[in-house]
Amino acid sequence: MKNYRIRFDAKSELYVAYVLYMKTIAANLTGEQAKELVLKLARAEYLENWFTYKKVEPLIKRLKSEERSSFKKQVFVDKAIDCKVKDWPYPLPKPLVLKVEDKAHVFKDIQREPCKYEIEYLTNHYFGAGMLKPQVMEKCDLFAHEYNLVCDYAATCDPWKSPLNQLFNRYRFIGFEQTFVHNKNLLAESTTEGRLNIMLVLVSKSGGVPEQVEKFLKLMVERHKNEPTTLRAAVIRSLVKRGSAWRLPENVWSLVLQFGVDIGLDGAETDPTCREGLHAVVLRHLLADVQISPALLTGFLRQFSTFTEYKLNLEEKKLVAKRLPPLILSSDANAFLTHLSNIKLI
C-alpha cells in the first residue's frame, strides 16, 4: 500500500476481495479514497455475492461521522450506483501449470490377480477361520477385490494385539451408528468373548450419549438379557466407567437395571458382583436425594467406595461430600473414617 500504490489502484477490486486485509487497506486510505473505493466495489456486478456492508465497514469508518449515514443509505438502501460493471476489467491470475515433456520414466506397476488360497490364508490368519469368509467370498470371481479388502483390514490389525484391541482399531474412525449397524447381529458371533468384545466397542462408541446408549441397551435387553452374568457385569462396568451411567435419563436407566439383573445392583450378594454398577445405583440415589433401602446400603458397605475413582463433576462432588457421611455414619464407623480421609479427593 505504501510502495506499490500504482499496482493496487490498477487492480483494487482483486486486492480488496481476495488478497489484502481490509483493515490494513482502510488504514492506508483517506476518507475520500475509501469512499471512491466503496463505490468502485459497489459497481462491480462480479462481486455482488461478496459485497456487503460488513465486508467494507472498515472503509466506511474512514469517512467523517456526519457523512456515513447518508453514504450507507446511498449505497446499500437506495443503491444509487450508476455505470455497473458486469465483468472483470482485467484477466485474473491463474496458477502455474507444470508441463511434463518427457514421460518416458513414468511406468505402471504390474497388476497381479492373487489366487484364491492367498485370500483364504489372510482371511483365516487375521479374522479367524470362517469369521468373515461369507463377506470376503461374496464375490468369489473378483479375487483382486477380495484380496484388497482383506489386506486393508490386515494393515490395521497387529497380530500381536488382543482380539478386543484389534476390534477397537477396526472401528477407530467409524461413528456409533455405522458400528452399530455392522455389529447388531451379535448372535452370529459364537463365542462369549467375541460377543463381549463387540459390546464393549459399542459402549465405547456410544460416548455416553443418552440416545445412543438407549439404542444399545434396547438391543441388549431384547436379545441378550440371558447372557452369562460375567458378560453382563463387564458391559455394565464399562457403561459406568466410560459412559457415566449414573447420569442417564430415567427411561435409559431402567434398561440398565433390566440388563443388570442378578449381578448385585440391588445390593444382593451375587457371584459375580458388579461393583461399579452397584456404585452407580448408590450414586444415583445420593445425587437425587432418594432414600437408600437397607439391602442396598448393606451391599454398598460390602463394596464401599468414596467415588473418587469416578469422573464426577464439581456439583456431584459437593453433593456426595454432603450426603455420603450421614448415610454411612450410623452403619459403619470405619467406612466413615475412610471417607473423611479421602474427602480432599472428592
Image (cartoon, helix red, strand yellow):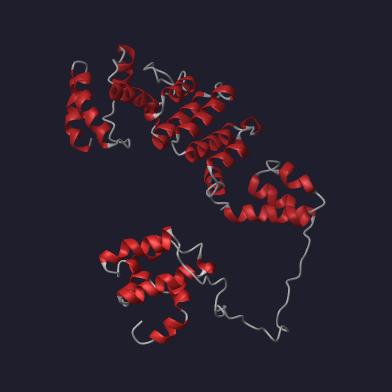
Question: Looking at the image, which is closer to me, 34 or 82?
Answer: 82
Residue 110: x %, y % from top left: 76, 70
- Asked which quadrant contains residue 66, the reply is bottom left
Q: Quadrant for the N terminus, please.
A: bottom left
Of residues 255 and 194, the one nearer the viewer is 255
317 is higher (above) or lower (below) than 70: above
Q: Nearer the viewer, residue 86 or 212?
A: 86
Residue positioned 36% across, 23% down in the render: 281
Quadrant of the drawing holding the C terminus: top left
Residue 164, compared with residue 292, is above or below; it is: below
Residue 191 falls in which quadrant of the image? top right
Residue in the image at 73% along x and 47% along y: 136
- Residue visible at 44% across and 76% down in the picture: 15
Write down the quadrant of residue 273 in the picture.
top left
Q: Seen in the image, is 150 located left or right of residue 224?
A: right
Residue 255, image x and y in percent?
Answer: 48, 23
Residue furthest to the top? 294
Q: Is residue 293 above or below residue 153?
A: above
Q: Farthest residue in the right direction?
A: 141
Q: Nearer the viewer, residue 184 or 93?
A: 93
Q: Residue at x 69, y 86 (%)?
A: 101
Count of marks placed on residues: 0
- 23 sits left or right of 86 in the view: left
> Where in the figure is residue 18, as x and y percent of width and height?
46, 71
Query: Residue 117's x, y, as percent?
Result: 77, 53
